[in-house]
Amino acid sequence: MRKTDYYSYWNKARVKKEKLLDRESASLKIIRKIARAGDKMLDVGCGNGDFMLLMKKHFPKAKIEGIDISKREVKEAQKRKLKVKLADIEKGAKLKANYYDIAYAGEVIEHLYNPDFFLEQMNSCLKKNGYLFITTPNLLAWYNRILALIGIQPLFLEPSTKSKLVGAGFLKRFKNESTPVGHVRIFTFSALEDLLKMHGFKIIEARGAIFDEGLPKKIWLIDRFFNAFPKLASHFVILAEKK
């Protein structure tokens, strides 16, 4: 079965980012605590390299590489003098074994048909006691629990490959865009923890992050309150260690 290419559409629709998203800011804070000079870092699903540039700024002595499935994004990242290559993690990215100290996968795992294969590759490419960062939406975010109770499709879940308005009920009036982003699997905290453990990783830090790309600014303050309770937050920011 051919996978629908949502990536191309959203790359074209992307607006220039003026500041870090909350999940990126949270990730950076954690990375700054654990990174060492000369670390080898990998950005999985690096896009046009925005986060890589930020990492290079904060860790100038680190060796930072990226992979992405989009030819357009890889080309743009390479124009920015970043070490990025075209790779489909679903088919196998051919990464060096036991090579990286830190791997970052921001908003990647929810797009994968086979997250197990992805984590097998991460385990293989990371050194012993290396770190894997994952950010991903939370199936049981505080508002999703409410929406499910009243019969509305929870946010982040996409039952249609044509429109994300399917099942949205009264939320349709608040959505400016109907094109799906290509979410395939959305996790609870316990599911993500079990999956990571099964593939040789242990969660050593978990934070929440707000859904600043999708929720109205009027409720960001409420959403931020739940960052203190990652199992209820909009997004997970997970730091896992390879055992």
Image (tube, helix red, strand yellow):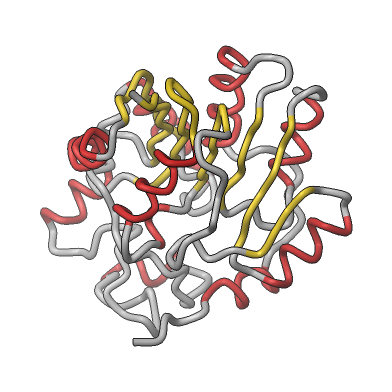
Residue 159 in sight in this render: yes
Considering the image in quadrants, where does the N terminus appear?
A: bottom left
Relative depth, front residue between 12 and 76: 76
Residue 26: % across, % down: 54, 27
Relative depth, front residue between 78 and 94: 94
Q: Quadrant of residue 129?
A: top left
Q: What residue is drawn where x is 87% and y is 52%?
A: 80
Relative depth, front residue between 97 and 208: 97
Q: Is 114 left or right of 14, judged from the image as shown?
A: left
Image position of 11 with respect to 192: above or below: below
Residue 51: % across, % down: 69, 41
Image position of 227 with respect to 13: above or below: above
Q: Quadrant of residue 161?
A: bottom left
Residue 4: % across, % down: 45, 82
Q: Quadrant of residue 165?
A: bottom left
Residue 175: % across, % down: 46, 68
Considering the image in quadrants, where does the C terminus appear?
A: top left
Q: Is 131 left or right of 187, judged from the image as shown?
A: right
Q: How many marks?
A: 0
Relative depth, front residue between 126 and 154: 126
Q: Is 171 left or right of 77, judged from the image as shown?
A: left
Q: What residue is drawn where x is 46% and y is 33%?
A: 132
Residue 219 in sight in this render: no
Image position of 15 with respect to 145: above or below: below
Q: What residue is drawn where x is 81% and y is 62%?
A: 76
